[in-house]
Image: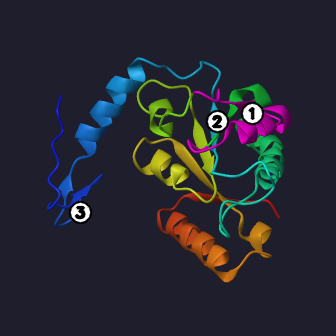
Amino acid sequence: MTLTLSLTTRYAMRELKGYIDISKDCLALVNRIALSRPAPANMQVIIAGNPTLASNRPLSDTSLTAEDEIRLCNRLVPMIQKRHGITAKEIYFKPHPRTSREDWELKKRDLKCKIYPFEENSLLDFDLVGQTPVQAVYSYHSDASIVAESIYGKKGYWVDILPLITKKGYRARMRVQTQTDLANAMNIEQVSLT
């Protein structure tokens, strides 16, 4: 299967006026790749991570530090366990593909759930397509929950981190607010940690 795209044509992952819908082609391609690497049988929920630095210094004013992300995820784990009736061993944290080894090792040591192997930096999509045990995806500062629900039919949860970044700059708050507005417009269930 070959998917050839023109740089002058507009494409979308759903039907939109003036765009060519390539969703079926993309999903077929992702499905073929995913078949060679099935998700672990006990993987029920994925928490999608973001790029951070282990040096407790965020990558930008809109990023969380590794320590921030660990605290956030560890607050989410009991909430997810209760909501889905699962154990921490069935919750997987998927680090962002740009995560450093130092950052990953810190998360491996301190997270209260499973974590993907460092070398496993493929698209989250591969664990959502086809016959997968994954029930839900939680994300913050990322569109992973929106993609999970709107493209793959998995339950998506948007974690509101706006209260956690009140000390960060205006740009950080506006970016998170924009992502929150998008999740709300797509009817993605919001989860509050406050």
- Neighbour class for label 2 at 10 Å: few (<14), some, many (≥20)? many
The kind of residue on which mark 1 rests is Gly
Mark 2 in CB contact with mark 3 (< 8 angstroms): no
Q: Which mark is residue 16?
A: 3
The N terminus lies in which quarter of the figure? Answer: top left
Q: Which mark is residue 85?
A: 1
88 in relation to 71, above or below: above
- 175 and 41: which is toward the camera: 175
Look at the image and give the residue range highlighted in magenta.
96-119
Q: Residue at left 56%, top 56%?
A: 142
Give coordinates of residue 117: x percent, y percent: 65, 26
Q: Is residue 154 left or right of residue 25?
A: right
The kind of residue on which mark 3 rests is Leu
Q: Residue at left 71%, top 70%?
A: 162
22 in relation to 187, above or below: above
- Neighbour class for label 1 at 10 Å: few (<14), some, many (≥20)? few
- Neighbour class for label 3 at 10 Å: few (<14), some, many (≥20)? few
Mark closer to the chain start, 2 or 3: 3
The kind of residue on which mark 2 rests is Val
Residue projecting furthest to the bottom: 170
Q: Residue at left 63%, top 51%?
A: 51
Give the distance between the C-alpha atoms of the residues marked 1 and 3, in whole angstroms: 38 Å
Q: Was residue 117 drawn as part of the magenta stretch in this picture?
A: yes
Q: Was residue 170 drawn as part of the magenta stretch in this picture?
A: no
Q: Which mark is residue 45?
A: 2
Give coordinates of residue 31: x percent, y percent: 35, 28
Judging from the image, what secondary structure is the residue with disc 3 in? loop
Q: Nearer the viewer, mark 1 or mark 3?
A: 3
Judging from the image, what secondary structure is the residue with disc 1 in? loop
Give coordinates of residue 59: x percent, y percent: 66, 60
